[in-house]
Image: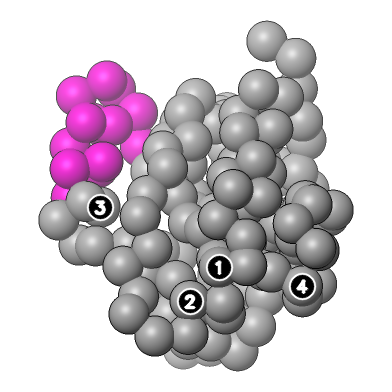
Amino acid sequence: MALKIPVELYDQLRQHGEATYPHECCGVLVGEFDESGGKVVKAAVTCGNTRTDSLANRYHISPSELVRIQRDAMLAGHDIVGFYHSHPDHPARWSTTDLAEAHWTGSSYVITSVENGRAVVTNSFLLLDHEEAKHFEDELLEVIEH
């Protein structure tokens, strides 16, 4: 399985990380599940980071914003397929906080490392919950042309 994302949206979420540096950016990936169980991103919805502390290493999406995005996605015949955020001056790997605060099982969590204001590496992780143990697995991130 893979997360497929058009190059324009891939560039958009990386640019969002650069624009908010040295703070974390965040957003929602809207799209659809394909026949193979993979996901195809149709939109990357930029969200405001509503954290009031630790903006350099934490993010939070307002519940009301998330409900609006989910409603709009459903009206368009899509689903929330994942989330994205940046790691300013840290690797594009999930942290223990990322895992603790991730709740959308089956969704992709895309992380971009932004070093000195430049997006460097972007990785995707699939949130799974097996036998009462929530965990991330590396996920293939496939950047596609339209």
Query: N-terminal of the two: label 1 or label 2?
Result: 1
> What is the x, y in percent for residue 122?
77, 52
Disc 4 from disc 1: Cα separation: 10 Å
Query: N-terminal of the two: label 1 or label 3?
Result: 1
Disc 2 from disc 3: Cα separation: 19 Å
- Identify the residue at the far right of this view: 120
- Find disc 1 in the rendering and name its residue: 23
Instruction: Inspect this view and state whether residue 108 appears.
Output: no
Residue type at mark 4 is Asp
**Nearer mark to the viewer, of 1 and 3:** 1
Instruction: State yes or no: residue 29 in magenta.
Output: no
- Find disc 4 in the rendering and name its residue: 89
Query: N-terminal of the two: label 4 or label 1?
Result: 1
Quarter of the image with the N terminus is: top right
Tell me, for residue 55, which label it has, or none: 2
Classify residue 124 by image quadrant.
bottom right
